Image (spheres, helix red, strand yellow):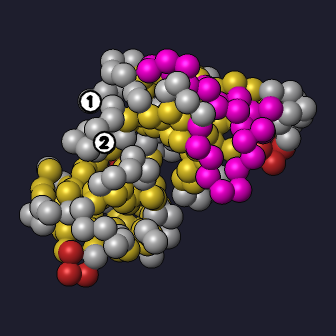
């Protein structure tokens, strides 16, 4: 069975702090994709990143970085120098190669205070 | 990226009436669309997979007679909540895929907030 676990329900930080959102997944597939989405209060889902299971390179995009470790089945997301606009719910998701279905984690609500 | 438009963004309806939500892929053809439901402060739960030209595939526990899905073209899928009840109040969001193993991204609509009074 496939499963995505985001153990952190809510995180609160003060602006300019770094914050890491954890994501642990379970799958028996050898080929799969991992995603992070941001859901601001308005509700829409904003795509942040996709990572293929065969590509363990970490990625940095501006203040965002992702750490993919197959050995621990984790795909963690770090925001450096957080800003108030980063306040949102962040979802980690998993998709197998042979299906279009996305399995979402329960989300982590991030609040960044000024 | 590709654009998926969902309409309406919010709707209030009376108990017992039906509500139709549209999901359109604006600049690509979507062979598959997905409908999710999200309760406040909870995750997205997949309701059904909508395939163009064929019947939708519903997840376990989702009433297919209550949540009617039609995917009549490659750019439009509709979700109709029939005989709505207050417990159907939720945030409904669709996603669309271009299809094929290399097209691994899902593009999401803006969501529809349904309130049944």
Callout 2: residue from which chain?
B
Looking at this view, name the residue that lies furthest to the right. Answer: B16
Looking at this view, name the residue that lies furthest to the left: A57
* Residue B68: quarter of image: top right
To which residue does mark 2 refer? B105
Relative placement, left or right, of B51 versus B67 is left
Residue found 61% across the figure and 26% down from its top: B70
Image coordinates for residue B22, horizontal then vertical, percent: 58, 23
Which label was assigned to residue A2?
A: none
> Are tags 1 and 2 found on a single chain?
yes
In-front residue for pair A36/A51 = A51
Q: Secondary structure at mark 2?
A: loop
Given residues B66 and A56, the one toward you in this image is B66
What is the x, y in percent for residue A29?
31, 67
Q: Is residue A23 visible?
A: yes
Q: Which of the labelled discs sits on residue B1, or is there none?
A: 1
The chain under label 1 reads B
Q: CA distance from mark 1 to mark 2?
A: 10 Å
Q: Are marks 1 and 2 in contact (CB under 8 Å)?
A: yes
Specify the farthest residue to the bottom: A72
Q: Which residue is found at the position 53% from the left and 41% from the top?
A: B49
Residue B69, position as x, y percentages in the image:
64, 31
Task: State left or right for residue A113 relative to residue A83.
Answer: right
Quarter of the image that includes the C terminus of chain A: bottom left
Tell me which segment is drawn in magenta: B56-82
- Lower sequence index among marks 1 and 2: 1
Q: Residues within 10 Å of mark 2 (few under 14, many from 20)?
A: many
Viewer-closest of A19 and B15:
B15
Q: Look at the numbered disc 1 and give the secondary structure of its residue.
A: loop
Q: Quadrant of residue B12?
A: top right
Residue B74 is situated, as x and y percent measured from the top left of the image, at 44, 21
């Amino acid at each position: 069975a496939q499963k995505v676990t985001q153990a952190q329900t809510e995180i609160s930080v003060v602006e300019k702090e770094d914050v890491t959102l954890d994501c642990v997944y379970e799958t028996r597939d050898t080929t799969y994709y991992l995603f992070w989405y941001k859901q601001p209060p308005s509700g829409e889902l904003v795509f942040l990143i996709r990572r293929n299971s065969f590509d363990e390179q970490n990625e940095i995009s501006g203040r965002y970085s992702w750490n993919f470790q197959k050995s621990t089945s984790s795909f963690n997301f770090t925001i450096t120098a957080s800003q108030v606009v980063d306040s949102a719910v962040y979802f980690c998701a998993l998709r197998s190669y042979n299906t279009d279905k996305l399995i979402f984690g329960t989300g982590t609500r991030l609040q960044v205070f000024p | 990226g590709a654009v998926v438009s969902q309409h309406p963004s919010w709707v209030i309806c009376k108990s017992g009436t039906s509500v139709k939500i549209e999901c359109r892929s604006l600049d690509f053809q979507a062979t598959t669309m997905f409908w999710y439901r999200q309760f406040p402060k909870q995750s997205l739960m997949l309701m059904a997979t909508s395939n163009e030209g064929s019947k939708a595939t519903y997840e376990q526990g989702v009433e297919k007679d209550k949540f009617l899905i039609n995917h009549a073209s490659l750019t439009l899928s509709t979700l109709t909540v029939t005989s709505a009840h207050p417990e159907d109040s939720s945030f409904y969001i669709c996603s669309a895929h271009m299809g094929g193993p290399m097209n691994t991204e899902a593009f999401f609509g803006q969501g529809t907030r349904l309130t049944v009074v």
